[in-house]
Amino acid sequence: MHIAVCIKQVPDTRNVRIDPDTHTLVRQGVESIINPFDLFAVEAALRIKDDTDAKVTALTMGPPQAEEALRETLSRGVDEAVLLSDRAFAGSDTWATSTTLAAAVRKLADVDLVICGKQAVDGDTAQVGPEMATLLDIPYATLVRSIEWTSGGDLKVTRQTDEGIEIWKLPLPSLITVLKEVGEPRMPSLRHKMRAKKAQIPVWGAADLGLSPDSVGLCGSYTQVVRVFSPPRRSDRVFIEGSVEEQAEALYRYLKEAKVPGI
Amino acid sequence: MKAIVDKKKCTVCGVCSDACPMGAITVGETHVDISDDCTLCGICVDTCEFGALSLPQVGTGPEEDLGLYSGVWVWAEWRDGSVHRVSHELLSAGRMLADKRSAPLCAVLLGSGLKENLSRELITFGADVVYVVDRPELARFTDEAYANVLVELIRTRKPEILLAGATSTGRSFIPRVAASLRTGLTADCTELDISEDGHLLQTRPAFGGNVMATIICPNRRPQMATVRPRVMKPLVIAGHEGRIENVSVPDECLKSRVEVLEVIPEQDQTARLTEAEVIISGGRGLRKAENFALLQELAGLVGGAVGASRGAVEEGWICPSHQVGQTGRTVAPSLYMAVGIAGAIQHVVGMQGSKFIVAVNKDPQAPIFDVAGCGVVADLFEFLPAFIRKIRQERGETS
């Protein structure tokens, strides 16, 4: 079995801040990390590999420095990695990103299962997984919290929805997006770290993927950002003081006045 | 590819250079230069008061006459025989958009054994037409069948705008609809408007809520967005009339390669975080699992749910389905009460959309107070019992 895991390098949101003067995002000096949900995707793939001897390939689309994120997945036990990098990919929305990743999965040719994280923490769209599956014309299940196999070799997954739990059966090839419940990501091992250091990571551009430059990046995107601004800050904060009884009384009044339901 | 500088308009003021998060703009002699580090984020375009900066155009997709598309559609989500609140909210937002475009507002109801009162309800919230596809294959949700049916309806009736709730179901299958139609989709919007030339202005938080971005889909139709629940206000339009149209779809639309084996509704009502009006959340400050009983009691009293920080979940005090934050649920109730939660950014991104945020913490420096509208600096083990007593006393109950 061949599993492709899609990962994204994102700015560490703990350090993202807004310049108070220009009201824009300060990304300089902000460290990049692997999107936390994608680490669960890597772990989910490695757990299948532990049991079945599957081959796991990590994919990412990004600038040349995203190679670092791929090496990290190798050091955790991923077999191979491919970097999708090209100036033409800049400015991709979820559609253009899905187009590029789907083309890479096609080029790998023998992928049985694609695993993505639930969403990336910088964009929070959760769209790339389902859009990729649509482009690849394979079934998918989002919000997967555990993975099993049926005796017939189908995938049996448990989904966590807003209302509860659903158990779905999917034939391969298929795509899933996973939650943290699939398992705590393992630490890099010394052996894999050595291998990761030496590994050659191929770089595929638009031409390698058979994509025309106007089907990727900004030109291949359908959505466009027209304005970026800081959210209005709450300035009306009140502190409730006094004895706990007074505080309880004051909070009760505050919520009553605010017409909070249930109070 | 990078941002484009109109050298005639550039005054070399340098404002864009300071604003560029990638440091890709250098100030030259006669105009600014943009390096290959440009990620086309568009931040500079907004900062230039001379209109000297622009981005290359987004794609047009397959050739099509956009003028053929008209009307605003809302995918009406329902469960346990009643319409999901977010669909009411979207109809109200959709009504405003439809009126501005002088176009009809339509709701799409997919399912099996749908009662007519569901459709009537959608009309009272502003729908002019309710399209109903009632088939046994739609009894249980699957991405493929739901998406294929919606795609079929859109292809034949060509709405200009499609809105859906950013629920676990909406966010799962709407991307398939957008990708099948080769159109753009904006996730998790918190504000919608329409420009004079018909662009749906879709505003959403990005980078964990640190910035807001307004996004358009200029060259493809329908313009599609999922909208975060509890942001728009639902409005009943008294006496509003509409019609119900039962639509039949080709059988192949209803095929799904996925088989739903089991659907198990969450039994613990206090874990139904995304639907709750009130969430009482606890963190490491609770010290042990037993103390969550205090939160359960308060939540029970106000009909709310119980949330938790990652810390409390990692301690094993409460199960992960209660977790709010980056790796848990994103919630936006009317009241979010954070008790004994320090307020790490990973927690805050999951709850900052709440209408009222009350923080209870004994450390006045706790970052949670930065996002709270109301702060209570107190020992939670003294304050919570007092607050519970107060509510009971107001209701004439004895504790």
Image (cartoon, helix red, strand yellow):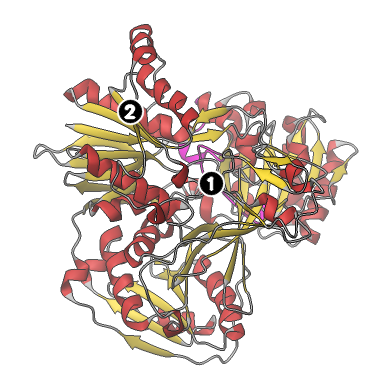
Q: Which residues are magenta?
A: B316-335
What kind of residue is marked 1? Answer: Gly
Badge 2: few (under 14), some or many (20 or more) residues near its Cα, within 10 Å?
Answer: few
User: Disc 2: which chain?
Assistant: A
Residue B375 magenta-drawn?
no
How far apart are the two marked residues, 2 and 1, measured between alpha carbons? 26 Å
Q: Which image quadrant: the C terminus of chain B?
A: top right
User: In terms of depth relative to the viewer, which is nearer, B85 or B95?
Assistant: B95
User: In terms of depth relative to the viewer, which is nearer, A205 or B330?
Assistant: A205
Indicate whether B247 appears above or below B342. Answer: below
Point 58% across, 76% down: residue: B92
Indicate whether B303 appears above or below B252. Answer: above
Point 55% across, 47% down: residue: B330
| Residue A141 rendering spot, x and y as whole percentages | 30, 48
User: Disc 1: which chain?
Assistant: A
Residue at far front of view: B29
What kind of residue is marked 2? Answer: Pro
Left or right: B393 in relation to B229: right
Left or right: A187 in relation to B10: left
- The mark closer to the camera, 2 or 1, is 2
Which residue is tagged 1? A123
Residue B204 seen in the figure: yes
Residue B321 magenta-drawn?
yes
Secondary structure under the numbered disc 2 in the rendered image: loop
User: In terms of depth relative to the viewer, which is nearer, B353 or A258?
Assistant: B353
Give the quarter of the image for residue A215: bottom left
